[in-house]
Image (cartoon, grey):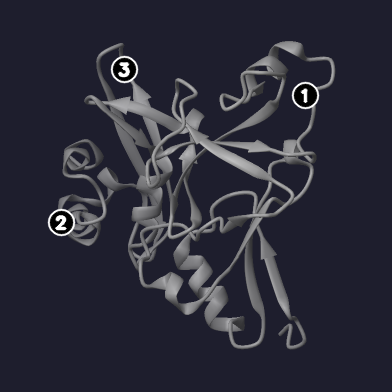
Amino acid sequence: TFQSIRVFTFGGEGFPKTELKKLYSLYGHQAKLVNVYGPTEGTCICSSYDISEKDFEDMNTLAPLGTINQNFEYIIVNENMQEVQNGEKGELCLIGPNVALGYYNDMERTNQSFVQNPRVTTHRDIIYKTGDIVYKKDSLLWFVGRVDNQIKHMGYRIELEEIESALNGVHYIQQSAVVYNKINEKYGKIIAFEHGTNCKGSLTGCGTDHAHLHIVAFKDSLLTFLLHTLIH
């Protein structure tokens, strides 16, 4: 099937490593697999990364976004619009002539996402806040999650996509989804759902013995303080 195909290009959301590995195993010998990134507000693809065998050494992360194209610049900022240090997580902000001017007939939303460049104080210089949490490592940008999917739980800031990536790295889990159930201002629960070869539904619905197998499989990938909220 697809014997003549030369390139697979994918983007829009993180490609789970387990599924990506299947695609790479089928076509990696004949075709290039390219992870691309570019929000609509950037009006074109602003980064890309070629998948290789090395990317499957760690199954608990998503493939890198790669390096930013030459017609873009970027900064990574914290919630106070201060630039973070190399390796620290923050929100990716895009700069350049391809970045949109704003949202048509929606000044409120425009003012929230298209803001002044914190590097520039002498004149107007607009950057776009993507809402994507990233960090830079080995000259590459790595996607962590969305700002709107970041929660604060037990004093920690947590990206729900990171938990999903860890779950998807378990060989018998095909897909997973993690949600946060906020019970009141002080308390909430992180709930994980998975579809795999051994059971369906929530982790808590698979029985104590099976749930224990899940803990053993991904405990090294998740922070210790999360375990007792994921599985009871």
Tell me the SS state at disc 2. helix
Q: Mark 1 vs mark 3: which is more N-terminal?
A: 1
Label 2 to label 3: alpha-carbon separation: 28 Å
Label 2 to label 1: alpha-carbon separation: 52 Å
Q: Mark 2 vs mark 1: which is more N-terminal?
A: 1
> Disc 2 marks which amino acid?
Asp
Question: Residue 4: x, y in percent?
Answer: 77, 86
- Return the residue nearer the eye: 184 or 8: 8
* Foreground tag (1 vs 3): 1
> Mark 1 = which residue?
102
- Return the residue nearer the eye: 217 or 84: 84
Instruction: From the viewer's perspective, tell me whether residue 206 is left or right of residue 71.
Output: left
Label 1 to label 3: alpha-carbon separation: 36 Å
Whether 43 is drawn above or below 210: the answer is above
- Return the residue nearer the eye: 19 or 35: 35
* Foreground tag (2 vs 3): 3
Whether 104 is drawn above or below 156: the answer is above
* Foreground tag (2 vs 1): 1
Q: Quadrant of the N terminus?
A: bottom right
> Disc 3 marks which amino acid?
Ile
- Residue at x 21% of width, y 52% of height: 211
- Residue at x 30% of width, y 12% of height: 184
Q: Are circles 2 and 1 on residues that touch, CB within 8 Å?
A: no
Dot 3, how many residues are within 10 Å of its Cα: few (below 14), some (14-19), or many (20+)? Answer: few
- Residue situated furthest right in the rendering: 104
Question: Residue 68: x, y in percent?
Answer: 63, 52
> Disc 1 marks which amino acid?
Gly
The numbered disc on residue 209 is 2
Tell me the SS state at disc 3. loop
> Mark 3 = which residue?
183
Question: Residue 193: x, y in percent?
Answer: 38, 45
Dot 2, how many residues are within 10 Å of its Cα: few (below 14), some (14-19), or many (20+)? Answer: few
